[in-house]
Amino acid sequence: MSDASGITDVTIIGGGPTGLFAAFYAGLRGVSCRIVDALPQLGGQLMALYPEKYVFDVGGLPRILAKDLAKNMIEQGTQFGPEVVLGEEVQRLEPDGDHIRLVTQKGEYLTKTVVITAGKGALNPRVLECPGWNEHAGDGGGVHTHVRQPEDFRGKRVLLVGGGDSAVDWVLGLKGVASEVTLIHRRPEFRAHKASVEQMWKAAEAGEVAVKTPYEVRSIHGRAGCVAKATIYNNDTNEDVEMEVDAVVALLGFKPDLGPIGNWGLELEKNTIKVSQLMETNLPGVYAAGDVVHYPGKLELIATGYGEAAIAVNNAVHHINPKARVNPGHSTNLKIFKQDD
């Protein structure tokens, strides 16, 4: 919570897993905290894009549904009572004396420090640039850029397009749910985790799914506003194949778009924010963590974001009070958790 003047010690821009872990660390350090997110709910992409998808690379959790990871992160991140502002995008970040003013489309917020955990920025999925896509876009049309609920595809003939983790994961995730699952990719090699790719090929060999390479979508056709067919083609031979389908899902990733963040005077590289080893940006009192940052050796993982969030918040606390230690010590020894020996 902010103080009586409305000034918060740390304001976190972004309510995904990295931002929520940053909020946890702010509470752990005993400083006031505010989370601001443009989405209507906390959880970031875990909730907005793939709540039913399993996440496998978080420490201590062999596998967990994204929505359940988000639920746990929200519980952990809000346990110390941060102020939560949802449905507001920060348009401007401006110095204001010893503080920083954040301006959204609905209001203004003063803070002593900022931690930007905005992920890839705006969620602008890549779409298929082919005849029929735009005609069938929107609710009920049959073309999609992500899978929110597998049950939405129950009993349907589904064509998936892509070669990354999401595409391969959803081939496996929709197996046994959809009546037919076909994945096409424009080249024989897949970018997904090796174990998942091997599992996909085993399912294909067993006749549970179909995998076609090197294929792309030529066009999408429909009846009464719904997808009915897709024409795909072999990009080596240019030979067309017509498929009867009920849904086309293009899992092609996202176009990086920092949105207003790109106009705040931050030093950028590769459409991300450059930070130091302390997660400092070039602006005093402004830190960043998670997929939004760049530094040599950066890995875009939730696990990496957790560590970066802790570094950012601990250094923000030290920025506010130079006498405060950067390293808070082990959580098991902190009085805030009131553990009995």
Image (tube, rainbow, N blue to C red):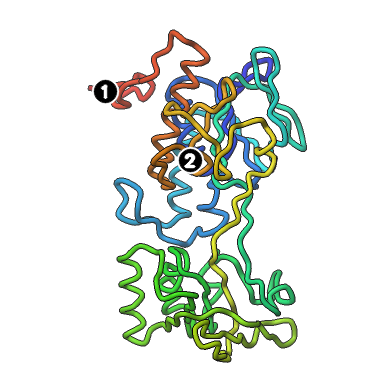
Closer mark to the observer between disc 2 and disc 1? 2
Q: Residue at x 45, y 65 (%)?
A: 164
- Which picture quadrant has residue 66? bottom left
Looking at the image, residue 141 sits to the left or right of residue 274; the answer is right
Q: What is the quadrant of residue 126 in the picture?
A: bottom right
How far across and down, in percent of the image, does residue 233 sit?
Answer: 55, 85
Q: Residues within 10 Å of mark 2 (few under 14, many from 20)?
A: many
Q: Position of residue 99 (x, y in %)?
A: 65, 17
Secondary structure found at label 2: helix
Name the disc covering residue 8, or none: none
Q: Which residue, given by chain and number where applicable, does mark 2 sit on?
A: 290
Q: Gap in Å between the C-alphas at discs 2 and 1?
A: 34 Å
The kind of residue on which mark 1 rests is Asp
| Viewer-closest of 119 and 6 | 119
Residue that extends furthest to the top in the rendered view of this protein? 323
Residue occupying image coordinates x 60% and y 21%? 8
Residues 203 and 129: in front is: 129
Establish if 239 lies above or below 62: below
Would residue 201 appear left or right of 293 to someone viewing this image?
left
**Image position, residue 283 (x, y; %):** 59, 24
Question: Which residue shows up at 51% across the image and 81% down it?
Answer: 215
Q: Which residue is mark 1?
A: 340
Q: Considering only vertical position in the picture, is 166 above or below 120?
A: below
- Dots 2 and 1: beta carbons under 8 Å? no
Q: Quadrant of the N terminus?
A: top right
Quadrant where the image shows the C terminus: top left
Residue lying at the far right of the rendered structure:
106
